[in-house]
Amino acid sequence: MIEVMFFFFAALAIGAAINVVVQKHVLYSALSLIVLLIAMSGLFILLQADFLAVINVIVYAGAIMVLFVFVIMLLNLPQDEDGADRLRWLKFLGVPMGLFLLFMILSTIWGARTVDGVEPRLVGSPEAIGRSLFTDFMLPFEVTSLLILIALMGAVVFAKKEL
Amino acid sequence: MILKMVIVFGGLLGAFAYLSLVERKVMAFVQMRPGPNRVGPFGLLQPIADGLKFLFKEQVQPTAANPWLYLAAPLISIIPALLSFSVIPFGPALQVTDLNVGLLVVFAVGSLSVYGIVLGGWASNSKYPLIASMRSSAQMISYELSLTLSVVGVLLLANTLSLVELVRSQEGTWLGFLPKWNVFLQPIGFIIYMIAATAESNRLPFDLAESEQELVSGWHTEYSGMKFGMYMLAEYGNLTASVCIATILFFGGWNGPSFGPDWLVMILPTIWFILKIAVFIFIYVLARATVPRIRYDQLMRFGWKYLLPVALANILITSFLVAIS
């Protein structure tokens, strides 16, 4: 049963991810991205990381993607090809960056070890995640919050012509 | 398990249909008119007549509409609305599944419900639905923050995210008569939750997405028949879900006096739970019949400048008090 679910969610995620890139219309890409995020949450649940799965849906599918969709509708972009032309040079940058990402992912997968005697439910629980956030990963956690604050202030500065 | 699913979802779908009758009857009572009273005694068969009408109406679809999204949007709306009930405990035994992150599941699913409205408005390819869907998405983002933050105080006190444990943490009484409900410990959190939940479920005074006077009928202007019916069901589903969470978090869930023979003791918790929900829904309907709609800039200013800071201050004070006690 779990294998069937895994292949279902994995296929859904890959299909949606390809669709994000292939679609011409921005809104369809955004919608595919939402499907991808939900499929990823399904995979997280199969790994017994319920908390991560739910947070993934709340933060990305429920909040950030709503903003994306909102902006797409607000601008109501026509299906123009100019945008693609203007960003043509990005294609050449895209190949090395994609290869680099692939390298990073593969090295992580090869570097991964199986750890015996760890209950997955204990690693994925809200308590465990909270504890590791406030002990081992305290500094990255705080730095991330600072980063988000800076981004927020930057958005305000951009949006308001005069402060 | 399957029996529970059938009881919960069958009961809910029936309840949603009859909520429309309750709403119309209560509003009629407030406005001193009889309300629906032709179909069956006291209009009791009205929801069934409505349902049949939904089914047999001609399926009208705007030619300029985006065909796939136009069809999918009501489904995208109703699936999250029903999904959140899979974790809500209606009684000690009447719950489809108990997750240790149950509350977050309800919020996650609730945050997805906005897509039904947004896509429905966009796919209709018509100006009023589009305006409504943009309003709705901005409103949902703004009030979701306050909604989520308003319950953090309760979570700090109860120290759990499981809905069953949240209910259990409110068992018993203080001084023998005052029930140990979180509403007495977190009154500010409760008020913020109710305001934000009203905004999330697009009810008056926050029904900017539907406002009949300006937007015809909001995001479902171009929908008719069963597709419109699904939107209605989803709206009542979201309303009921947010009310269920309010009951579980702040009013002790299924807790209540238990007495009588064994069979009564078994079903009493569910009856208490349903009674508490009914009171909340009655208040919501009363609000719809009495409160005027607020303006859009007022909505945004209220959400960001008043509701959110108060919710943050509430968390700060609560965590301080929890830390020193």
Image: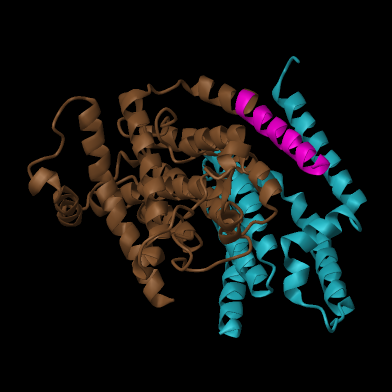
Chain colours: A cyan, B brown
Seen from the viewer's position, the closer of residues B221 and B296 is B296
Q: Quadrant of residue B147?
A: top right
Q: Is residue B191 above or below residue A39?
A: above
Q: Quadrant of residue B127?
A: top left
Residue B49, position as x, y percentages in the image: 14, 52
Q: Is residue A154 above or below residue A109?
A: above
Assign the C terminus of chain B to one quadrant of the image. Answer: top right
Q: Quadrant of residue A49?
A: bottom right
Residue B47, position as x, y percentages in the image: 19, 50
x 82%, y 34%: residue: A150
For the stretch drawn in magenta, the main secondary structure is: helix
Residue B201, position as x, y percentages in the image: 44, 41
From the viewer's perspective, is A35 left or right of B210?
A: right
x 73%, y 26%: residue: A156
Q: Is residue B280 magenta?
A: no
From the viewer's perspective, is B281 left or right of A71?
A: left
Assign the N terminus of chain B to one quadrant of the image. Answer: bottom left
**Farthest residue in the front direction?**
B176
Q: Is residue B205 above or below residue B50?
A: above
Seen from the viewer's position, the closer of residues B135 and B239 is B239
x 58%, y 73%: residue: A9
Residue B30, position as x, y percentages in the image: 24, 27
Seen from the viewer's position, the closer of residues A49 and B93 is B93
Q: Is residue B322 magenta?
A: yes
The count of marks equals 0
Residue segment shown in magenta: B306-325
Is residue A81 in view from this perspective?
no
x 27%, y 39%: residue: B23
